């Protein structure tokens, strides 16, 4: 097939299983059903995969519409190798609890870092005061 520029090259990937990494850090896995010139995606039978350490959990999300500007990475999943993962699948409740604990640990470490910098007379701007871009 001849080269097609831009999102037109994804037309042959319709109805295949894909992993989508979003700008906010979320990971979605689902079947690509539609795409447009802005790289907006429609995913079917979508799950949100959460990774914590060597564990992961899948949260069913159904049909998911993703705005193209939020896509960081889009890749087709090899169905033959999909089950060959060193990660352990756990329940939704367990992975959400592990994620909460991990986020809490990161926040505490960040507070300690900011405190140590303040003691040395340095200041770090808060993340919520910075521009998104």
Image: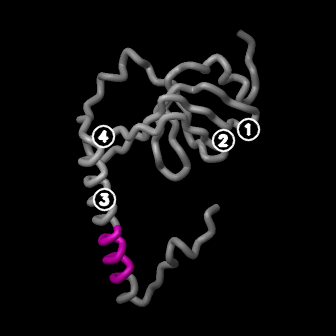
Q: Residue at x 33, y 61 (%)?
A: 103
- Residue 122 in percent (x, y) is at 45, 85
Q: Is residue 57 magenta?
A: no
**Sequence-first tag of 2 and 3:** 2
- Residue 18 in percent (x, y) is at 51, 28
**Sequence-first tag of 3 and 1:** 1
Q: Quadrant of residue 54?
A: top left
Judge left or right: residue 122 versus residue 4: left
Dots 1, 2 in contact, CB < 8 A: yes
| Crowding at mark 1 (Cα within 10 Å: few <14, some 14-19, many 20+) | few
Magenta residues span 107-116
Q: From the image, tell me which residue sits under label 2.
A: 68
**Sequence-first tag of 4 and 1:** 1
In the depicted structure, whether residue 102 falls above or below residue 125: above
Q: Which mark is residue 38?
A: 1
Per the model, the C-alpha gap separating discs 4 and 3 is 13 Å
Quadrant where the C terminus lies? bottom right
Q: Quadrant of residue 128?
A: bottom right
Judge left or right: residue 48 versus residue 65: left
- Residue 114 in percent (x, y) is at 38, 79
Q: From the image, tell me which residue sits under label 4.
A: 56
């Amino acid at each position: 097939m001849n080269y097609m520029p831009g999102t037109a090259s994804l037309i042959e990937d319709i109805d295949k299983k894909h992993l989508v990494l979003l700008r906010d850090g979320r990971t979605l896995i689902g079947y690509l059903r539609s795409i447009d010139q802005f790289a907006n995606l429609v995913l079917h039978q979508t799950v949100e995969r959460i990774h914590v350490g060597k564990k992961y959990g899948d949260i069913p999300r159904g049909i998911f519409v993703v705005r193209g500007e939020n896509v960081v990475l889009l890749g087709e999943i090899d169905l033959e190798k999909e089950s060959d993962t060193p990660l352990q699948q756990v329940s939704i409740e367990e992975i959400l609890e592990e994620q909460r604990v991990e986020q809490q640990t990161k926040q505490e470490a960040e507070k300690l870092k900011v405190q140590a910098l303040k003691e040395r007379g340095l200041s770090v701007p808060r993340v919520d005061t910075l521009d998104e871009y």
